């Protein structure tokens, strides 16, 4: 199977690592994700990953409960580092060289984020996992994914979720919800579809980085997406809404 992209950014939610657990990290799910990533790397694709931390701590929820928002976001950033190191371990155990770079200095366990060094790792076929978000409160890991994708010249963002694309309404509550095949950035923003936050979508629009939203729980979907198969929903500047 050929590939449609040379360098990609994979955005994983923290919840994706949780599996069916109510909290934390399911080791079997992490191992499955690592196997999927390894297949793509073995095809010669350069892979960068941004992972969220919602399976451990969600800053927005904590702030709503009275915690200072900036403090809550910093705790959330640390949660993403925990997920990043866990994923790194799973990848290294199956022979995939991996580096974690963090936006908050943690030199004993990870490299600091340095753009040129990240690109060099990718050129050497190492997976690079970006932890600690952007290093700034009030920004989501979706925005971090868009920012890092632009910085490393990724050709596409793959947003791996638990649903098979973007719908016009919540498919869990509306059995007649329509799944879009393709969307423009402007349509996502004006209709507030919330697949990613508006800052992330705007960054992707400005830098012309397409976004593919697909279901991570279907085995083989990462490879299918990288090969250019129509999985999920494609958001891009030249797409027709369909």
Image (tube, rainbow, N blue to C red):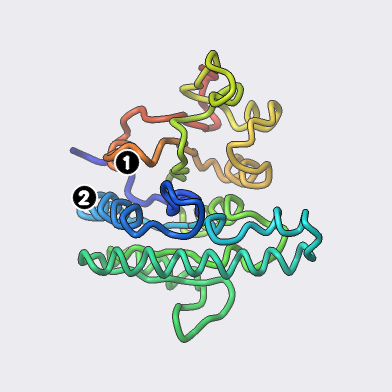
- Residue at 64 percent across and 26 percent down: it is 187
Against 16, is 188 above or below?
A: above
- Residue at 51 percent across and 42 percent down: it is 209
The answer to whether the residue labelled 2 contacts the one labelled 1, judged by CB atoms less than 8 Å apart, is yes
- Residue at 36 percent across and 40 percent down: it is 217
Disc 1: CA contacts within 10 A as few (<14), some (14-19) or many (>=20): many
Per the rendering, the mark at residue 226 is 1
| 62 relative to 142 in the view: left or right | right
| 18 relative to 204 in the view: left or right | left
Q: How many marks?
A: 2
Against 234, is 177 above or below?
A: above
Circle 1: element type: helix
Per the rendering, the mark at residue 12 is none
Per the rendering, the mark at residue 43 is 2
Residue 102: percent from left, percent from top:
52, 72
State the image quarter where residue 84 is shown: bottom left
Residue 212: percent from left, percent from top:
45, 37
């Amino acid at each position: 199977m050929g590939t449609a992209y040379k360098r990609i950014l994979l955005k994983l939610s923290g919840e994706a690592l949780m599996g069916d657990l109510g909290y934390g990290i399911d080791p079997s799910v992490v191992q499955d994700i690592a196997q999927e990533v390894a297949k793509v790397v073995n095809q010669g694709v350069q892979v960068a990953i941004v992972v969220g931390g919602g399976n451990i701590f969600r800053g927005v929820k904590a702030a709503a409960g009275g915690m200072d928002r900036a403090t809550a976001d910093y705790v959330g950033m640390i949660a993403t580092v925990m997920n990043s190191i866990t994923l790194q371990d799973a990848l290294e155990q199956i022979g995939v060289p991996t580096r974690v770079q963090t936006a908050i200095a943690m030199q004993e366990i990870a490299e600091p984020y340095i753009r040129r060094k990240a690109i060099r790792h990718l050129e050497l076929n190492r997976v690079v996992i970006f932890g600690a978000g952007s290093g700034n409160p009030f920004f989501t890991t979706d925005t971090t994914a868009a920012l890092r994708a632009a910085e490393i010249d990724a050709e596409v963002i793959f947003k791996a979720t638990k649903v098979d694309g973007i719908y016009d309404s919540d498919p869990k509550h509306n059995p007649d919800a329509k799944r879009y095949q393709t969307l423009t950035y402007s349509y996502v923003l004006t209709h507030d579809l919330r697949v990613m936050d508006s800052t992330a979508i705007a960054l992707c629009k400005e830098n012309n980085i397409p976004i593919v939203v697909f279901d991570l729980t279907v085995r083989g979907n990462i490879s299918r997406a990288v090969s250019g198969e129509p999985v999920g929903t494609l958001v891009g500047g030249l797409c027709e809404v369909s």
